[in-house]
Amino acid sequence: MRLILLGPPGAGKGTQSARLKQKYNIPQLSTGDMLRAAVAAQTPVGLQAKAVMDSGGLVSDDIVIGIVADRIEEPDAKNGFILDGFPRTVAQAEALQKMLGSKNMNLDAVIELKVDEQALLDRIKTRVDETLKAGGTVRADDNPDAFKTRLEAYKVQTAPVSHYYAGKGALKSVDGMAPIESVTQAIDHILEH
Ligand code: AMP
């Protein structure tokens, strides 16, 4: 099973990916997580990516495509994966197509979580409050300014990715405003039919 979950920041991609990972026993490939790990480890990629991530902008296609190309070669991704946060530009979607094509691999589904903007702002605020309450560290890009930039990057650079897959007849949409369990069920329904 090879899946892409699309949707704006805060739409619930991470939550749903984690559930799909359990259900299908395939890894969740979150480019955001991989980049944050690179930043924490101060690798050359991390050092390059940090400032743009903190501001809420998108890391360059070359860097992200390179990370994903390496990651899908890992043994645990052999039987499938869930891409969470990738592709975020049409150039990334095209690069993915080439990568998979060269391995004779197909995508099984591209699922978009649809949510409205005010709900996203509320969710991010809740995420910050809950993290603080639990004594955790808030993501550097979970502040109002960076979040606005992330949302803008989504509208300008990532929304065309939905059109890209819709044009191929591959896009399925799910109401991301529904309760988490209902979203999971809607995704299961798509994957089972
Ligand atoms: P996320 O955890 O998916 O919200 O990603 C956090 C940040 O990592 C984003 O705001 C971007 O700066 C960067 N990032 C993650 N995935 C990508 C991607 N596919 N292309 C470019 N930048 C990315």
Image: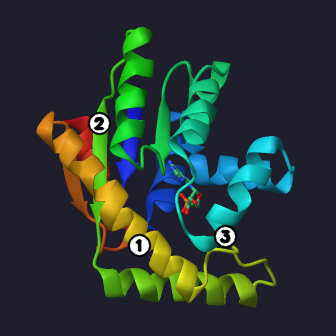
Q: Which mark is residue 54?
A: 3
Circle 2: element type: strand
Q: Is residue 21 visible?
A: yes
**Residue type at the position of mark 3:** Asp
Tell me the crowding category of disc 2: few under 14, some 14 to 19, or many 20 or more residues within 10 angstroms, Cα based: some
Of the two numbered discs 2 and 1 on the same chain, state the one appearing first in sequence.
2
Looking at the image, residue 2 sits to the left or right of residue 143; the answer is left
Between 183 and 83, the one nearer to me in the picture: 83
Of the two numbered discs 3 and 1 on the same chain, state the one appearing first in sequence.
3
Q: Which mark is residue 117?
A: none
The residue that appears at 42% across and 10% down in the rendered structure is: 102
Tell me the crowding category of disc 3: few under 14, some 14 to 19, or many 20 or more residues within 10 angstroms, Cα based: some
In the rendered image, residue 55, in percent from the top left (x then y), is placed at 61, 72
The residue that appears at 81% across and 84% down in the rendered structure is: 135
In the rendered image, residue 143, in percent from the top left (x then y), is placed at 60, 84
Disc 1: which residue: 151
In this view, 79 is above or below 132: above
In the rendered image, residue 105, in percent from the top left (x then y), is placed at 38, 16
Disc 2: which residue: 109
Q: Quadrant of the N terminus?
A: top left
- Measure how far apart labels 3 and 2 are at the Cα level: 31 Å
Between 14 and 54, the one nearer to me in the picture: 54
Q: Nearer the viewer, mark 2 or mark 1?
A: 1
In this view, 83 is above or below 73: below
Tell me the crowding category of disc 1: few under 14, some 14 to 19, or many 20 or more residues within 10 angstroms, Cα based: many
**Quadrant of the image where one finds ligand 1:** bottom right
Looking at the image, residue 144 sits to the left or right of residue 52; the answer is left
**Residue type at the position of mark 1:** Leu
Between 126 and 66, the one nearer to me in the picture: 66
